[in-house]
Image (tube, rainbow, N blue to C red):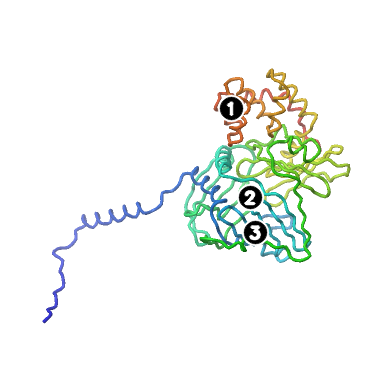
Amino acid sequence: MIRERPPCRPTGAVGPAAMSAVLLAASACCALAAPRRPTAEELVRRCLAAQDTVALRGTVVVVSPSAGGVSTSTRRIVRGPTGATLTTILTPRSQRGALTLDDGTWTTTYEPSHRLAKIKRSPPRCAASVARRTRRVLANYTATVEDEVPLAGRVCYRLRLTPRAGDGCIVTLWVDRQKGVELGREECDRRGNTHALMLFTEVEFPGRLSSKELAFRPPKGTRCLNVSRGAYSRSLATLSSIARFPVVAPLTVPAGYEFECGHVVRINGADTAVLRYSNGLVNLTICQTESAVPAPVGAMRLARGESVVAVSTGRRHVVIFGHHPTDALYAVAGALDPRLCSSFESRIAAQFGVGADMVRSLRDRGLTAEGVVVALAARRRTRLTVAQLVNLYEQGWGWRDIAHRYGIRHRDVAAQITAFQASWSPRR
């Protein structure tokens, strides 16, 4: 015979003190389980690294002001674990089917309306570039982790990046808490006007992707045009030999920008040298060509807060794109005059008592006047060679960082450059 066991009865009520202890212990367990909020530096590094290490599929909405009002597009993005990315436009209907495929070696842009596929080399990227970009972002922006917000069914940290100087945009990033992927971006000016907004509306992180998801076969009848004339290079002498005309580094650029790399492409039948400067977050693109054919000149504001200026002097034509007012870009164009650059190189070599070849070797690496002066001043104050200083620069240490590191006052650098400022007046 099985006897039913009587129900257990409490021997006494739980007092308030005991209940408080239980709740306090439960709260502590929850706190231990919650992920630690990363520092701004950690989040910037994770976000930049995720661009080349995290696979995803998703749909993105891009909104930006345009001449006719507000431009909106929807795009499908597939990205592999090594950074290879296929972006396909879904809307508006007039652009549907246009795509860009960057497989890490080549970038193909397909325009269905013209049945044209343009192919060019992809910019170089590696683990070292993440560290370099992280240093530049943190040197040029004040980074703040604001709060956690939901987006596309995920929990994201909201990261605010405010320019330390100049007229650049304030950038807000929504960074996935688990994967470190940028799922949203807003760019606005200091008055609060939005220049661009990008948001994922849906996203997934697959364990693997099939090769077909990151492939593009041009439709029959498509004209394929390879516009690249050579590999990317950090040497302007190498670019000049490919372009068959002297490629010049500007004597000045907006604060915080450093030379990344350059390459030569074929545009409208002419070889064009394209130099890319970056502050870690946005780029300044300088295009130079020589041709007897007249080129349009002028300036205009583009979508997403970008401007473009075009300047011609004789056979030499320059076009500059950047997230700055047109006056700032005209100043860069004026600082590309080959005669002014040659004069600067001769005078600064005499001032520091070095050979002109040393100054030209620095300029060949894309250094501005500020960079040249800091490098020569640091060489004078330390036992470092010019090659070692350039190596620090290429690791992401800006020239102002290097100046501070070796006790070189920026006002002294500025004083040495002031004599040349009058020669940099914009030519319009």
**Depth order, front residue of 403/265:** 265
Residue at image mark 3: 87
- Labels 3 & 1 near each other (Cβ < 8 A): no
SS label for mark 2: loop
SS label for mark 3: strand
3 or 1: tag closer to the N-terminus: 3
How many residues crowd mark 3 within 10 Å: few (<14), some (14–19), many (20+)?
many
Q: Quadrant of residue 418?
A: top right
Residue 403 disc label: 1
Q: Quadrant of residue 341?
A: top right
Kind of residue indicated by mark 3: Thr
Instruction: Work out how far the residue at label 2 is from the one at label 3, CA to CA, in angstroms.
Output: 27 Å
Q: Quadrant of the N terminus?
A: bottom left
Q: Quadrant of the C terminus?
A: top right
SS label for mark 1: helix
In the displayed structure, 22 sits above or below 286; it is below
In the displayed structure, 96 sits above or below 415; it is below
Observer-side mark, 2 or 3, equals 3
- Labels 2 & 3 near each other (Cβ < 8 A): no
Residue found at the far bottom of this picture: 1
1 or 2: tag closer to the N-terminus: 2
Residue 377 disc label: none
Instruction: Work out how far the residue at label 3 is from the one at label 1, CA to CA, in angstroms.
Output: 41 Å
Residue 193 disc label: 2
Kind of residue indicated by mark 2: Asn
2 or 3: tag closer to the N-terminus: 3
Observer-side mark, 3 or 1, equals 3
Q: Residue at x 71, y 56 (%)?
A: 109
Instruction: Work out how far the residue at label 1 is from the one at label 2, CA to CA, in angstroms.
Output: 35 Å
How many residues crowd mark 1 within 10 Å: few (<14), some (14–19), many (20+)?
many
